[in-house]
Image (cartoon, rainbow, N blue to C red):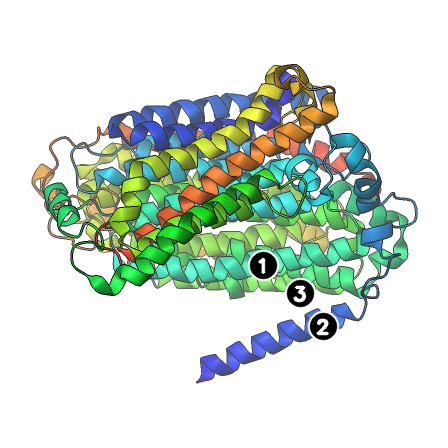
Amino acid sequence: MSDQLPAVLVLAPLFGALLVTLVGWKDHRVCFPITATTLFVTLLTAIAAAYQVFTTGTIDYFVGGWEEPIGIGIHLRIDALNALLLVAIAIVAFLVSFFSIRRIGEKNAEKTPYFYSLFLMLCLGLFGITIAGDAFNLFVLVEVSSLTSYGLIAMGSSRRGTLAAFNYVLMGTVGASFYLIGVGYLYLKTGTLNMQEIHTIMGANPEIAASKAVSIAFLFILIGIWIKMAFFPLHGWLPNAYSYCPSSSACLLAPLMTKISVYVMIRVMLSVFGYDWVFLSPGWSNLVVWLAVIAILVGSILALAQRELKKMLCYLIVAEVGYMVGGAWLADKELWGLTGSLYHILADAMMTLCLFLAAGIFAKRFRAREISDLEGMFRRAPVVSIGFVVGALAMIGVPPTAGFFSKFYLIRGGMDAGHWEFVVALLISSLVNAVLFFRIFEIAFFGNKPAEGHGHEEGDGHEDEADLPLSKNPPTSAPPAWAGIFPLLTSAALILLLGIFNGEIVGFIRVFLESLPHLASHLQ
Amino acid sequence: MLSKVFATLAVVITGSILLYGVTDFPAFGDPKSPASAGVPGSESVSQYFITESYGDTKVPNLVTSVLADYRGYDTMFETVVIFAAGMAIFAILRVVGDEKDSRKKRVEENTFTNGDHSRIIVGTTCRIVVPVIQLFALYVIAHGHHSPGGGFQGGVILGASFIILALSDHLNAALRRFSEKSYTIIAVVGILIYAAFGVVAQLLGANFLDYGVLQPLLFTDGPEMARSHSMLGVEIGVAFTVTAIMFAIYANLSTRGLLRNGL
């Protein structure tokens, strides 16, 4: 059974989604238990897969048993590059499923099964993208995850959310098409879709590797992925889409979607085109790092200008994407930039989850959407505030949180590569984050608004409240408080654990980087 | 105005880059192009399909064998994409109205027989044509591995037959035959059928979607015929989902999620 792990990883959420649709129709209360159980099974599978990668090495899985000649069937692969990411996705999805517990007897309850069905299919798509070893299969699963995320974003009641989802549909479609065009060009020149095989062919045939069509394929794949990850000039869709959608959708999408795209970019760079090919001419590397620098600065500055908490976090995501893209393109000799970037994918997933969960709880229970609404929040919700503080400190980069170590590795990479502008941008961004979050701490801690206690909690007429619970009438039974607090505190704890065990995690990541034959020479 | 200039510029630049890449392509129809003949040192995938797929699967239509067997994992997720589209549309649009009200309306606007003569010609024609369309759809599904066709195409035709029924008569006439409950169940069952072929293979000790090991269950002569029959099975699964979601999307879009009155 253990050799079936990659298949189980996508099949468990698939069956969960089908079951939720079938059974949830009759009774909405079974939706959450099914979802949570499915995601728990997936989490165990992901951990087992990561453990197997750690002990016995890469897992290769050939669907349908079509192994030879390579490329006729579909190849799934779990290696040191994606094993930890799988665990991270599973953790985030599992935790968010708790946050999404809904009040019983609320309006629009009939949409509950659809919500969980989309939720599980999104997870399925993300797992599928992560383990794909076939360039076209990756596109199919990008479609699954994109379609479900459009649905999850548009589900809220606010009109702005619907408009944002529509913009996202347009941008996302362009991004996916660009990726597909790139894969098509690549297929025309190499005659295969298997990532490993494309890489082998390009290595063995320099004239193919040097051809115009392959360069254009790379350009289009890259831009397509950049649109999906909201990299700086292409980030326009993200802030509205993630801030006006239901809180539980935002908590799922914000930590995962952009990070997965960064992973896809790194996977394409390393496993399809190859490190040497990508960094053949330093001009590209310099250009992308400069774009990343602009992304970091623009994201940070726009975050400063926001009055809504979620919008501010969204602009921070734009800046964080800059960190990861920049790190991946630093091309320093010892690959600390790439290491930092891969580590930051995990760290940022947890940080974003933590902050969005906190923001979601503030919005759901306290109707606090604007930063100024957070006055006195430390008194009104001390536990939630602690979680928020941990996430915020990680964003700023205070040791021993994970955020500090990813910045540490990224800065080390930047210094090794001589990209001082990247180092400066990282430091400025940390400074801006410090200003941002300490301003919030000040409002939340010293705010002089009298604590109104529970009287303020439910519904003061926010008609465009984008939360899934669309209730205007006070609900008969609110979701239990632990449904928000449990995932929040777990994610906060994970931020600390990721930071404390950064050495082990980075060691695991570098096993992969050192195993690539063309990188071994760089690392010596 | 400025945004239009930018958009045009973006389109022109993208188009020129793509066209620039085309100059580097192998000639149109070139039998020695990498996609047909492979590159030095690597056997071509398409060459393998052309020479080996019939032996592997006993399916004369090699497009079907690539789609449903070699790359069956992709096709399963394409079906999931369609299912996800349906779920997303339900999630966004579906509104459960007042149940009593809708039942009353259903009685009122029963069919075209309640005095609206302008619909007689269209209604009668469609009533005659719909069974033929459906029969043809079943043919396209069942014959997918011998001739062009398969689950997606057949499913779309079958779904269209219900849409024609809804257009020519009344949405409720179509919904009475294909209710919300049944299309949701059929959409789910379609994917379940597809995945079941894969999971049963896993239970028998092979990899996901390795149809060859299903031989003892399908009572065939060899693993090749098992593959052939399994392909028919998964095509039927695809057709279930596509049919259901096609009609469901129409029903929800045309009524803004109310599922009553219709166009």
Label 2, residues with CA under 10 Å away: few <14, some 14-19, many ≥20: few
Label 1, residues with CA under 10 Å away: few <14, some 14-19, many ≥20: some
Q: Amino acid at mark 1?
A: Ser
**Local secondary structure at mark 2:** helix
Residue at point 74%, 20% (across, down):
B222
Quarter of the image that includes the C terminus of chain B: bottom left
Q: Are marks 1 and 2 on the same chain?
A: no
| Residue B30 versus residue A86 in the image, above or below | below
Q: Are marks 1 and 3 on the same chain?
A: yes
Label 3, residues with CA under 10 Å away: few <14, some 14-19, many ≥20: few
Chain containing the residue with disc 2 = B
Name the spot of residue A463 as percent of width and height, x first.
16, 54
Tell me the residue that label 3 is attached to. A287
Name the spot of residue B128 as percent of width and height, x first.
39, 52
Residue A236 relative to residue A486: left or right: right
Name the spot of residue A315 as percent of width and height, x first.
42, 57
Q: Amino acid at mark 3?
A: Leu
Tell me the residue that label 2 is attached to. B19
Q: Quadrant of residue B228?
A: top right
- Evaluate if marks 1 and 3 touch, with contact meaning CB atoms under 8 Å apart: no
Residue A357 relative to residue B49: left or right: left
Residue at point 75%, 72% (across, down):
B20
Examine the rendering and report whether any part of residue A337 can be seen: no
